[in-house]
Image: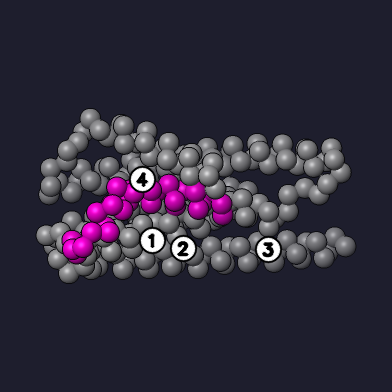
């Protein structure tokens, strides 16, 4: 997980460096935020594919080493746990990158609100958004790795679409009181991602068990 977190932190730092020349963005120019979100999602999804290719090389090395010492190769469960760890690393990197600077003021005595979200404490909204993306990134990685392995185009499309949808939902927070709508919607997307990942994992494991039984 630590390697995955470092990998994704580097990608986010690179993205922030690219966009630094265009900052600050004037408040109210929602299209600039939309472009920022779109480029961020594209870069992260491209990075996900690179991450998967690096993982496949590592998997080949581990399997080759297992063959040399007469040990079993990585099982399907092992592979899913690795993708889970990679996804958790992505989610943690996202939370650290966007929320670490908020930890110190969050433990102050007062409750902080912003003008556009006067009904929900700012730190609570930030924590819920971080939680939503943590869940989305963690379980999207399992869906994506499985889709790449099976060459399943539909799931390869689902992952970036879910990521982009969740990211665009944060624009709702720019509207007055928008956090009361955007934040719950983001958590709904996170719950749907978790549920879809559960279905994918159960299907893949069941099919694998059936193949093993038939081969025996």
Relative to 45, 102 lies left or right = left
Q: Position of residue 207 (x, y in %)?
A: 71, 63
Label 3 to label 4, Cα distance in Å?
A: 34 Å
Residue under label 2: 193
Query: Which comes sooner in the sequence, label 1 or label 4?
Result: 4
**What mark, if any, has residue 97 been given in the picture?**
4
Give the image quarter of residue 8.
top left
SS of the residue under disc 3: helix
Q: Nearer the viewer, mark 2 or mark 4?
A: 4
Q: Nearer the viewer, residue 151 or 203?
A: 203
Residue under label 1: 132
Relative to 181, 115 lies left or right = left
Residue under label 3: 205
SS of the residue under disc 1: helix
Relative to 10, 62 lies left or right = right
Q: Nearer the viewer, mark 1 or mark 3?
A: 1
Query: Which comes sooner in the sequence, label 2 or label 4?
Result: 4
Q: Which residues are magenta?
A: 84-112
Task: Answer whether residue 40 is visible to the viewer in this image.
Answer: yes
SS of the residue under disc 4: helix
Task: Answer whether residue 172 is visible to the viewer in this image.
Answer: no
Above/below status of 107 relative to 181: above
Residue drawn at point x = 83 percent, y = 64 percent = 214
Are the residues tagged 2 and 4 within 8 Å (C-beta)?
no
Q: Nearer the viewer, mark 1 or mark 4?
A: 4
SS of the residue under disc 2: helix
């Amino acid at each position: 997980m630590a390697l995955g977190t470092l990998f994704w932190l580097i990608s986010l730092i690179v993205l922030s460096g690219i966009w630094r020349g265009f900052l600050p963005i004037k408040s109210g120019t929602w299209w600039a935020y939309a472009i920022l979100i779109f480029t961020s999602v594209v870069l992260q999804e491209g990075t996900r594919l690179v991450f998967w290719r690096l993982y496949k090389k590592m998997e080949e090395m581990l399997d080759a080493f297992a063959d040399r010492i007469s040990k079993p190769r990585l099982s399907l469960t092992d592979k899913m746990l690795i993708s889970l760890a990679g996804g958790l690393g992505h989610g943690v990197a996202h939370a650290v990158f966007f929320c670490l600077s908020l930890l110190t003021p969050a433990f102050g005595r007062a409750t902080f609100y912003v003008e556009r979200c006067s009904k929900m404490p700012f730190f609570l909204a930030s924590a819920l958004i971080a939680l939503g993306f943590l869940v989305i990134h963690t379980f999207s990685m399992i869906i994506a790795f499985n889709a790449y392995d099976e060459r399943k185009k539909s799931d390869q499309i689902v992952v970036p679409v879910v990521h982009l949808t969740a990211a665009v939902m944060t624009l709702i927070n720019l509207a007055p009181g928008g956090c009361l709508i955007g934040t719950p919607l983001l958590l709904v997307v996170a719950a749907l991602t978790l549920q879809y990942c559960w279905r994918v994992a159960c299907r893949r494991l069941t099919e694998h068990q059936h193949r093993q039984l038939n081969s025996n």
